Image (cartoon, helix red, strand yellow):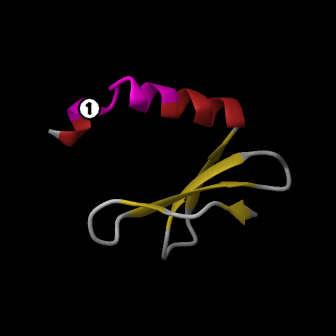
Amino acid sequence: MAWSEPFCSEGANCFRLGRGADGRAHIGTTGSAAYVSDSVDALRALISAVKAGAADHLLA
């Protein structure tokens, strides 16, 4: 699997995005072998929704 450079916020809260040989997209945290996997289109939709504020209520 090819992982991108981690995106880090405060402290050690780092997420990484990757793409497997099968073409699926992956989101994981650094320091863990666990990750979420779905289609590239699903990842694109998730990122668009987060940018639009769909998850803002989780931050309050």
Magenta stretch: dominant SS? helix
Q: Name the residue beneath numbered marker 1.
A: 56
Q: How many C-alpha atoms fall within 10 Å of the one at disc 1: few (<14), some, or many (≥20)?
A: few
SS at mark 1 in the image: helix
- Type of the residue with mark 1: Asp
Residue 21 lies, in percent from the top left, at 85, 55
* Residue under the image location 33 percent in, 60 percent down: 9
Vertical comparison of 29 with 26: above or below? below
For the N terminus, which image quadrant? bottom right
Quarter of the image for residue 8 reads bottom left
Q: Please identify the residue farthest to the right as the structure is shown.
A: 21
Q: Which residues are magenta?
A: 48-57
Residue under the image location 35 percent in, 25 percent down:
54
Tell me what residue is drawn at x 51 percent, y 63 percent.
Answer: 6
Which is nearer the eye, 4 or 35?
Answer: 4
Q: Quadrant of residue 3?
A: bottom right
Where residue 10 appears, as percent x and y from the top left, is 27, 64
13 left or right of 56 in image: right
In the picture shown, does residue 55 fall above or below 18? above
